[in-house]
Image: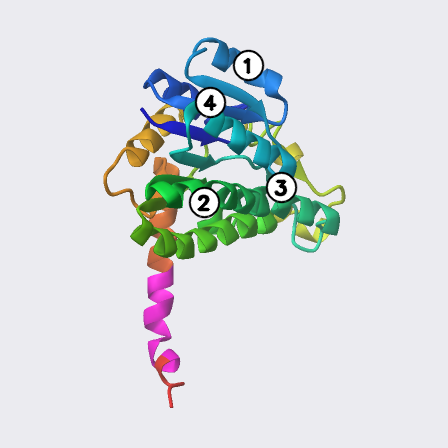
Amino acid sequence: MATWLITGCSTGLGRALAQAVLAHGHNAVVTARNVTTVEGIAAAYPDTALPLPLDVINSAEIKSVVQQARTRFGGIDVLVNNAGYGYRAAVEEADDGDIRELFDTNFFGAVSMIKAVLPSMRAKGAGAILNISSIGARISPPGSGYYSASKAALEGLSGSLRKELRPLGISVTVVEPGAFRTDFAGRSLTQSAAAIEDYAETAGKRRKENDTMDGTQPGDPAKAAEAILAVAESPEPPSLLVLGKDAFDAFAAVAEAERTDLDTWRDLSLSTDI
């Protein structure tokens, strides 16, 4: 039995993961900004679930959650940084305040969670950190520049963190989901207040009023949760887990295009050495 701390459990992937973790017999600290949204999950597992309020941009709440997890379960074995939200705008359209708020949650919130759990993980020489990213970090769709950037920042951090922690017995895995049947493209998706007409055929097509994806996504959150559980329980967790055929195919296409560019411009790239 392991103790999991999962952020952003009110809906979607976080909620499905919390339910799966508890169903598999593990302890789970189930968090959400509004704790009432997760109390129903915890009620079914009174001995192994601990529902707590947590906004990942609130340092006092982070400290309290980690301390309560240690008091109740003795420590945290698995941290899942799932809390986050989507934001759509052409790069030029985005409000500066919106951008900072997005990064505070999607990137800096995850950083704060990682720093809060690492002292105890280092002390026992074991642990797993799973950072929920997005295929958007790889494919950079028009209109999702800032969201993609927030997830790309998390992935860059995760790569270095993995190299720092692996010798200490702690694994780090980035999870890149594709489109899943969650609230991400609905309630959880925000966008710029203003739209510039020149971007109507690029970023504009992906604004909420023009997007028909919500409710039709191909991914099953329950199956994604089982895949994440399998990774966390693996003796050799991967550095990256891509979830969904759409994400897998998109990842492969980007990798192939990047390889083509690399080979095409090889001579110029190599020409700059002294």
Q: Which residue is mark 4?
A: 72
Place of residue 71 in the rendered image (x, y in percent of width and height, measured from the top left):
48, 26
Q: Distance from label 2 to label 1 (Cα)?
A: 29 Å
Q: Which residue is mark 3?
A: 87
| Dot label at residue 119 | 2
Q: Residue at x 42, y 19 (%)?
A: 19
Q: Name the element at disc 3.
A: strand
Place of residue 220 in the rendered image (x, y in percent of width and height, measured from the top left):
40, 25
Q: Distance from label 1 to label 3 (Cα)?
A: 28 Å
The magenta-colored residue range is 258-269
Residue 142 visible? The answer is no
Residue 258 visible? The answer is yes
The mark closer to the camera, 4 or 1, is 4
Report the label total.
Answer: 4
Residue furthest toward the bottom?
274
Q: Distance from label 3 to label 2 (Cα)?
A: 33 Å
The mark closer to the camera, 1 or 3, is 1
Place of residue 57 in the rendered image (x, y in percent of width and height, measured from the top left):
63, 40
Q: Name the element at disc 4.
A: helix
